[in-house]
């Protein structure tokens, strides 16, 4: 036996005006079986918004990312820092957000020194995918040179467990849509201080780093003067490790597994890398000297 509610015209609306939000409503059909019968009902679902975002430096388009269309100013700052395009926030003079028919353009005015460096690199990216870089001109452009991080402090395993247990309480967009990643900055006690969300795990990290720099929670040069750690909702990919190394993040905990290249970068940069961070259990892969029993 089945039943189906009266169909309604499919509708889509932005939850908050201007299209600069992380979710939109849509009408869906929900199939459900209970006690030998099933029903098909109409319902409203919240969908994560995914938008093409072009980062344009001094009038030259550099990269197009698929991202959640909110917090784009801090996203542009974080991306510029973690990709080595600028050395500090002071190298960015102006950021303008311009919605266009195909998506959103983020127009950045940067110093001539950084722009010349950007052109010399000829890093002509067409975007990033869930598995890494897309559109790099050569294999040498996939990995940026990273130095060892400066992080002469330690945290307890209990701090990692505390942050992991509390993580979902700080991810409202994930709770609404079930389709985004989160990047959290936690202090040495495991208290979550700041979280950014995005459909892309590396975008969430860029937004977090940009926000920390913008709010002067950390130094403009990176996180070397802040004792704490990164908690990421995804696997620990090479992108996460490379961006963290560029920002001088010394400890990373990921809810899922690390990749082999991520472990290589963690060893190269002396980053403490933790994977499979779940309640009451996690696995330490590299630089365990920063972990206290």
Image (spheres, helix red, strand yellow):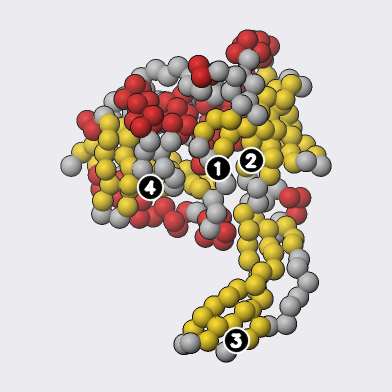
Q: Nearer the viewer, residue 84 or 217?
A: 84
Question: Is the residue 251 above or below the residue 61 in the image?
Answer: below
Question: For the residues marked 2 and 3, what is the alpha-carbon distance in whole angstroms?
Answer: 40 Å
Residue pointed to by mark 4: 255
Residue 21 at x, y percent in the picture:
67, 51
Cβ atoms at labels 4 and 3 below 8 Å apart: no
Q: Nearer the viewer, residue 114 or 234?
A: 234
Residue 162 at x, y percent in the picture:
32, 51
Residue pointed to by mark 2: 66
Task: Tell me if 18 is positioned left or right of 38 in this view.
Answer: right
- Residue 200 — which label? 1
Cβ atoms at labels 1 and 2 below 8 Å apart: yes
Q: Secondary structure at mark 4?
A: loop
Query: Could you tell me which residue is drawn at 68 percent across and 83 percent down?
Result: 5
Task: Tell me if 35 is positioned left or right of 14 in this view.
Answer: left
Q: Residues within 10 Å of mark 1 (few under 14, many from 20)?
A: many
Q: Earlier in the sequence, mark 1 or mark 2?
A: 2
Q: Secondary structure at mark 3?
A: strand
Q: Earlier in the sequence, mark 2 or mark 3?
A: 3
Question: For the residues marked 4 and 2, what is the alpha-carbon distance in whole angstroms?
Answer: 22 Å
């Amino acid at each position: 036996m089945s039943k189906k509610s009266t169909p309604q015209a499919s509708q889509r609306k932005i939850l908050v005006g201007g299209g600069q939000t992380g979710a939109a409503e849509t009408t869906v059909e929900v199939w459900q079986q209970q006690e030998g019968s099933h029903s098909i009902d109409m319902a409203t679902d919240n969908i994560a918004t995914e938008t093409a975002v072009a980062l344009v430096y001094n009038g030259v388009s550099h990269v197009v990312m698929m991202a959640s269309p909110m917090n784009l100013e801090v996203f542009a700052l974080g991306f510029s820092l973690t990709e080595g395009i600028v050395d500090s926030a002071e190298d960015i003079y102006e950021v303008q957000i311009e919605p266009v028919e195909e998506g959103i353009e983020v127009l950045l005015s940067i110093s001539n020194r950084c722009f010349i460096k950007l052109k010399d690199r000829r890093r002509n990216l067409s975007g990033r995918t869930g598995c890494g870089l897309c559109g790099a001109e050569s294999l040498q452009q996939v990995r940026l040179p990273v130095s060892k991080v400066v992080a002469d402090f330690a945290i307890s395993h209990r701090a990692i467990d505390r942050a992991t247990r509390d993580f979902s309480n700080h991810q409202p967009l994930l709770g609404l849509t079930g389709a985004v990643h989160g990047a959290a900055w936690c202090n040495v006690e495991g208290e979550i201080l700041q979280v950014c969300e995005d459909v892309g795990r590396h975008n969430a990290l860029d937004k977090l780093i940009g926000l920390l720099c913008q709010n002067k929670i950390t130094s403009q040069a990176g996180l070397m003067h802040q004792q704490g750690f990164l908690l990421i909702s995804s696997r620990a990919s090479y992108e996460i490790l490379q961006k963290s190394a560029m920002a001088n993040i010394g400890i990373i905990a990921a809810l899922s597994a690390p990749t082999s290249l991520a472990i290589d970068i963690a060893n190269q940069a002396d980053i403490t890398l933790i994977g499979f961070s779940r309640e009451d259990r996690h696995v330490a892969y590299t630089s365990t000297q920063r972990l206290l029993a």
